[in-house]
Image (cartoon, rainbow, N blue to C red):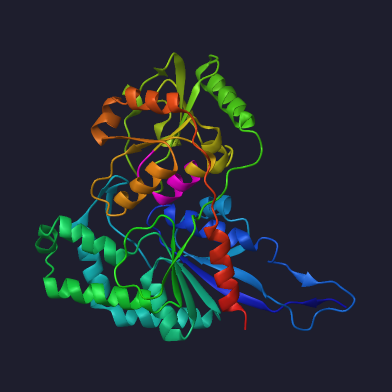
Amino acid sequence: MSHALPTKHCVVAISSHGFGHLAQVAPVLNQFTSEITQTDPSPNPNPNPVAPSIRFTLRTKLPALHMARRVRVPFAIDVVSDDFGMQMYSALESDLPASLRRYQALHADWTRHVDQVAEQLAEQAADLVFADIPYLTLAGASQAGVTAVAICSLNWADILVQSVRACPAALSQAGMGLQTFERILQTMRDAYASAAVFLQPTPSMSMVGLANARSIGVVGEPPPKTCPETVIRWVERIHQKENNKQTRDPWLVLVSMGGIPTELQPAAWPTHCNGRAVIYLVTAALANQHPHAVVVDGHAPTYQALIAASDVVLTKPGYGTFVEACAAGTPILSVARADWPESDALMRWVSDSGHVQTITHGQLTAGDFCTALSVLLNRGRSEPIEMTGAATAAQTIRGLITP
């Protein structure tokens, strides 16, 4: 007779602000792949198993298909968003006054929102909340008496502080007084402090006053062990099919701006560099806007496989793409994101951990980046980094969810 281990319920609250928060959560959840259906089939089962099996519910409004491509453990979805992060014009520019107005509206009815989340967590019989980084969910967990673990390379309180410091006029533009702003910040910090631990993956922005902070290693999904030649051949076949011509030995540039809708204008982008054609791997929105564009859709190889097979990743400062590119040794062509407070920490880290060149948004639009692209192609791949943070985070969850 086999004895199933007791099942615990972990509610995973993920910010819907782009795809970067999922990129930090998914590698941690994937550490549990071998444990989800764990039972003890031995003739003399252990009456005191070391760890329970865990079922996961993802609490977010991110696209289900995107989550399924990232998360390899079984999961349910609770289509709720406790966190908008920042209002954005695009992946490259935030709308600070609009963000402040949304925070003011949220906190005007804060107690009701916390009560509602606490009730929902109780109804779901949550044993642990794992949050990246909806502070409303953390506050609700605290009120419901549910242990919580926060994880992120940023927090919204410090994002707001640094954003307002850089643009103080945004407060008056939003119709918010300084005392109201400071009261909102304190509520946010109290919610973050309510977690049993706030895990800060390498690299993280500077965070003020988090007594429960704990630094961990890099968190990301490792590149596939299979040879990227398979992906390269796939790209060449698709390019030939879509453009009715064959391109030999092209450079592959993966264009990845994350989950925030961003209008790009690739028509002027270079078609050749260092004597070879350049193929851009793009989303469907950019189809037919460049003669060397190949659409990366749901039938494409995994994102990590595309990164590993590419010669360069064209992106903006963002945790997930930066660390996964460095894990594959793929050079990064980064579009400056001047108003994003996390950028400095990410750029310092990637300059030490990989190969990177920076261009402006204007250069991107004008296609004036062949020189920077050439520098990266001449330099080649960097030494891949190790990513140990996901295992540490998973062990933290195991330790707190085990009775």
**How far from the left and from the top, in percent, is residue 84?**
34, 62
Quarter of the image where the N terminus is located: bottom right
Please give the name of the residue rendered at 55% of the width and 71% of the height, measured from the top-left corner: 396
- Residue 381 lies in magenta, yes or no? no
Quarter of the image where the C terminus is located: bottom right
Say whether residue 260 is visible: no
In the drawing, does residue 293 fall left or right of residue 48?
Answer: left
Q: Quadrant of residue 215?
A: bottom left
Please give the name of the residue rendered at 83% of the width and 78% of the height, measured from the top-left corner: 45
Say whether residue 344 is visible: yes
In the drawing, does residue 168 fall left or right of residue 198?
Answer: left
Please give the name of the residue rendered at 53% of the width and 41% of the height, measured from the top-left corner: 384
The rendered magenta stretch, by its main secondary structure, is classed as helix
Q: Is residue 351 above or below residue 58?
A: above
The magenta segment: 315-325
Residue nearer the viewer, 301 or 340? 340
As drawn, which residue projects farthest toward the right? 43
In the drawing, does residue 284 fall left or right of residue 393?
Answer: left
Q: Is residue 382 above or below residue 339?
A: above
**How far from the left and from the top, in percent, is residue 159?**
27, 60
In the drawing, does residue 377 fall left or right of residue 247?
Answer: left
**How far from the left and from the top, in percent, is residue 110?**
29, 78
**How far from the left and from the top, in percent, is residue 379?**
44, 27
Please give the name of the residue rendered at 38% of the width and 26% of the height, measured from the top-left corner: 375
Q: How many marks?
A: 0
Q: Quadrant of residue 26?
A: bottom right
Q: Is residue 331 above or below residue 348?
A: above
